[in-house]
Image (cartoon, grey):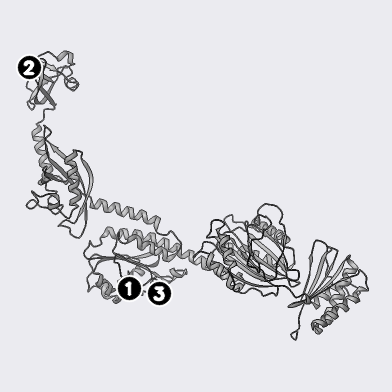
Amino acid sequence: MLIDTAGTVVGWSTAAEELLGYPAEVVVGRPLTQLLGDDRAAAADVVFRHRDGSLIGCRIRLRREQAKPGGACVKVDLLPNGEDSSAVDKALLDALFNRSPIGLCLLDPELRLTRFNAAADGMQGISATHGLGLRPTEAWPTFSAKHAEQVLTTVLETGEPVLGFEKTGRPPDDPDTEHIYSASAFRLEDEDGRILGVADTIVDVTAHRRAQQRLALTAEAGSRIGTTLDVLHTATEFAEMVVPRLADSVAVDLLEPVLTGQDMPQPPGRPGWSLRRAASRSRRTGVEPSVYAAGEASDLPDAAPAAQALIDHRPRLVREVDQDSAWVRGDPVRDRRMQEEKVRSLIVVPLVVRDSALGLVTLHRWSPGRPFDEEDLALAQDLAVRAAIALDNARLHLRERNAVLTLQRGLLPRDLPTPGAVEAGHHMVLSGAGGDWTDVIALPGARVALVVGRTPGRGMGTTATMGRLRTAVQTLAALDLAPDEVMARLDDLVRQMDAESADPAAASPVGTTCLYLVYDPVTCRCALAAAGHAGLAALRPDGTVTFPELPPAEPLGRPGPPFARVERHLTQGSRLALFTPGLLQAFADDTGRAALTKLLAASTESVQSTSLTLTEQLVPADPPEDAAVLVARTRTLDPASVGEWELPSDPAAVATARSLATRQLHAWGLAKEVFATELIVSELVTNAIRYARPPVHLRLIHDRQLTCEVSDGSSSAPHLRHARTTDEGGRGLLLVSQLAERWGARYENLGKTIWAEQPLSAAT
């Protein structure tokens, strides 16, 4: 309120109206004495009567106001509650300076320390006898003094308080530990606004911050440890996590079965099982992080306390390492390094999963530094549990990968066949997926089939499926089916295998890609069909690289148009490169084809070396998918090694066919094969003339085998009969099957061809 020199109320605020209940129009102009009550509220400076008759004790504060139009007046501030504020203020000041756990420092406008409470005494390395009168950079130079002085200067200049800025340092009562303080500063002013200095409150948040750091480290470990299924990489991730945030150095030692993907023996830690260093890390630079290199055997003496952790699965905490203790004397190799680094404290934690110890983690802290405590041990155990799970997952993955590779190598040929039609070489990069394969299959008539395929998925199921499909391709090739017919039959098999699978999560053959190419060295033509996006590149003798257009087709087992066959003419000496999609897995676009083109064009080495170069240059290290490439150099069969005749559809032509065959065999120097060949030619030509229709062709091919082919214009299938003793005929094909090493039939657009192969004699 405002009162004039006569004691009359001339101003009334809203707060006064709320306090005493009188509106301004009722009070203004009345003497102040009319508002006073009796003195029953003795604890108050003055007692006022509320409009409802109740009494309110208040403290008052008077200030002279500038003269008003009606004369000079006094501003009266009413402070309700008749408590003795001075006593409260005194008690508050006493608590702040003597009993408060929060450090309080008072500095004058020159930032000289004038006073601080008991909690601040010694908190930042200052004492009541040495800190007074000093600036922050003089009072606590090792406690972020420059930064603190800058903050306090800003508070003095702007009047804006600063909350929660940090100071760090090592107090005298705990020199081994760096403490963290949260400080806040605000400016001090008197009633007239004169700057008296600045107050700095300090709270030691070291324990809280360490707890936050432990939680953050634990949370980060969940995302950083085990990002891959590689044992050594996982161990390295753990080492990088704990140094320097938890330890000054760390060593991760694993048992042999973990590194090789084998089953863990029971019980773990038995003498004779060696440890190998998987990872190590140190804060020191310019030297090796440990006495053992990665992969090196790091056997522990049986008497070493760390070796017992492998058996009882209990962690060890050594707060203060004594150079004469069992930890030092039990391991002379590590002893020298521990003395060199002045190791002060250590923790040993076994890596345990399902009651099996995978190895050990050893953490060190050096002098000077805070020794490990129980909280550090708990954190190390938590991190070790996460690392152990990730390492065991990597071990299981490695075990399965080894099993897949073993099965895959067993299902794939060690060496490719060497037919005379091509010179072939292949190479595979096995990642553990288990679905890629290549094949070279010798066909009758000196022809050869080149195959490359990929089954989707990974694991044992995928490898087994690959083996079944590869066997199916070989079986279909033995039937001498056309490439498009092979793809159609293979597609039916894939659909049947998928329908028979009882487990929806099992590896499905649906989506298999396959390229089947048949090359004929007599005509220098190749016929091919593909399912899915199989890869094919052709290198001409002049160095030109092309990617022949394949007939569009969906992968096996998926709906789509019928499989089509295309034919291409190849120049003698051309190179074909058949490959699975994994060969170009490192490329996201057509740059992969460009790189493949460059390598093929520059290739002057053997086909086997070329296939190896392609995988080495194009496939990344440790690829996620398999990669297979088959390189074949085509050859042309000498025309002099082929005899071909067209025969009339007359039984008399059988004798002519025998004579022609005999004359050709003598020209080739195959006199020993004349008798069997005459019988085979006689029976095949007789069947063609008797049961088929013209034209009838006879062809003899002299390659690594002697092949006799008789073609006719009929598509009726030959049938091998077992004639009875009273039958006059029906023994023709039975006789052919006895004389030939193998025989069969293939169907063409117009008619069929019956063929029979004979091995050549050793003299030939």
Q: Secondary structure at mark 3?
A: loop
Q: Is residue 37 left or right of residue 639?
A: left
Q: In front here: 497 or 647?
A: 647
Q: Is residue 425 visible?
A: yes
Please tell me in which quadrant of the rendered image residue 514 appears.
bottom right
Does 665 appear above or below 30? below
Q: In front here: 490 or 562?
A: 562
Q: Secondary structure at mark 2?
A: loop
**Residue 667 at x, y percent in the picture:** 82, 82
Amino acid carrying label 1: it is: Val
Q: Is residue 160 left or right of residue 86?
A: right
Amino acid carrying label 3: it is: Trp
**Residue 412 at x, y percent in the picture:** 61, 70
Q: Residues within 10 Å of mark 2 (few under 14, many from 20)?
A: some
Res. 273 mark: 3
Q: Is residue 88 left or right of residue 682?
A: left
Q: Residues within 10 Å of mark 3 (few under 14, many from 20)?
A: some
Q: Secondary structure at mark 1?
A: loop
Q: In front here: 55 or 542?
A: 542
Does 350 appear above or below 678? above
Cα–Cα gap, marks 1 and 2: 93 Å
Q: Is residue 728 visible?
A: no
**Residue 483 at x, y percent in the picture:** 72, 62
Disc 2: which residue: 7
Amino acid carrying label 2: it is: Gly
Q: Residues within 10 Å of mark 1 (few under 14, many from 20)?
A: some
Disc 1: which residue: 291
Q: Are marks 3 and 2 in contact (CB under 8 Å)?
A: no
Quarter holding the N terminus is top left
Quarter holding the C terminus is bottom right
Cα–Cα gap, marks 1 and 3: 20 Å
Depth-wise, is mark 1 or mark 3 nearer the camera?
A: 1
